[in-house]
Image (tube, rainbow, N blue to C red):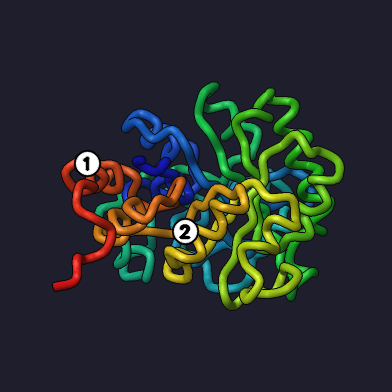
């Protein structure tokens, strides 16, 4: 089975992350499922941004000056103020620019609202990561407030059947699931997070206890045994963020249900039938 390919932050190896023009370009290229990140402005608008603080790798003022690191929190800006920043290209020489040299600049792109993004395509699917922090509660709105805002927008757009809500901070999805058990949920994990009960040793069973749906582990932390346990427990497994063709093919052979990648076009090319014909593990001599 070929896993579902999910574009991380849109398709950020190719286009500016989490932007309307970036999503539009990826949609035109055939991407149909995206992982996006949601925060909230001071005036209560849910917006698409991976970081709670504007990134100096991505953000310029209206006069073209790159911002400095660590100074501008989205929570402390009204949406109108946020729109004064351009996030349409990576800063030359930055870590982001070096990591994604093929990214096409789209000058003039700004941080969009969640509602505008969900309205881009009536059939696209969206995995919405709620960006709150278990160990930095003052940096963002409370997780309960943010997930309620997300649900309100999803209902207004009529996208309930096309979204999955996930977070490393399980308080948000846990709260929303009590109100909206009809929505799909995914539970992000990595060894350096402690937002779930029981910790790493009890995975994937802690995901089942939270209500199940989808487990989204860091791909290097997934093993065939953990994948088998998750499937036996009725979970979908969608590892993040898988960017090397060899890793993509290996995980597909194991039987993951989907994978999140910065380059969904490369992933689609890597998963051609010939690549999946050999067994997932070398045959011993």
Residue 125 x %, y %: 53, 33
Query: Which residue corresponds to mark 2?
Result: 240
Which image quarter: residue 21?
A: top left
Question: In which quadrant will I find the N terminus?
Answer: top left
Q: Is residue 105 left or right of residue 20?
A: left
Q: Residue at x 58, y 55 (%)?
A: 215
Earlier-in-chain disc, 2 versus 1:
2
Q: CB under 8 Å between callouts 2 and 1?
A: no
Single out the residue that lies furthest toward the right.
179
Secondary element under disc 2, as helix, strand or loop, is loop
Q: Position of residue 281 (x, y in %)?
A: 26, 64
**How many C-alpha atoms fall within 10 Å of the one at disc 1: few (<14), some, or many (≥20)?**
few
Give the position of the C terminus as an image quadrant.
bottom left
| Res. 59 in view | no
Circle 1 sits in a helix, a strand or a loop, which is it? loop
> 236 or 16, which is in the foreground?
236
- Residue at numbered disc 1: 272
Image spot of residue 156 (x, y percent): 74, 26
Q: 244 above or below 83?
A: below
**Residue 236 in view of the camera:** yes
Q: Residue at x 71, y 37 (%)?
A: 183
């Amino acid at each position: 089975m070929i896993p579902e390919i999910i574009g991380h932050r849109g398709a950020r190896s190719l286009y500016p992350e989490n932007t309307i023009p970036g999503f539009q370009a990826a949609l035109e290229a055939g991407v149909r499922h995206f992982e996006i990140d949601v925060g909230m402005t001071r005036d209560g608008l849910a917006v698409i941004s991976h970081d709670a603080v504007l990134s100096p790798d991505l953000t310029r003022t209206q006069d073209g000056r790159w911002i400095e690191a660590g100074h501008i929190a989205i929570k402390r800006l009204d949406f109108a103020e946020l729109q004064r920043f351009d996030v349409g290209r990576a800063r030359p020489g930055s870590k982001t620019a070096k990591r994604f040299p093929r990214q096409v600049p789209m000058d003039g792109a700004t941080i969009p609202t969640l509602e505008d993004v969900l309205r881009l395509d009536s059939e696209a699917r969206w995995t919405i990561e709620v960006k709150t922090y278990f160990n930095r509660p003052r940096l963002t709105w409370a997780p309960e407030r943010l997930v309620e805002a997300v649900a309100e927008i999803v209902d207004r757009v009529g996208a309930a059947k096309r979204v999955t809500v996930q977070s490393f901070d399980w308080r948000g999805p846990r709260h929303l699931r009590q109100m909206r058990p009809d929505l799909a949920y995914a539970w992000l994990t990595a060894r350096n997070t402690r937002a779930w009960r029981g910790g790493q040793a009890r995975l994937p069973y802690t995901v089942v206890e939270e209500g199940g749906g989808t487990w989204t582990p860091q791909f290097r932390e997934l093993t065939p045994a953990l994948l088998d346990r998750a499937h036996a427990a009725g979970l979908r497994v969608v590892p993040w963020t898988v960017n090397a063709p060899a890793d993509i093919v290996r995980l597909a052979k194991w039987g993951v249900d989907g994978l999140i990648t910065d380059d969904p076009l490369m992933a689609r090319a890597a998963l051609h039938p010939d690549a999946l014909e050999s067994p997932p593990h070398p045959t011993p001599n």
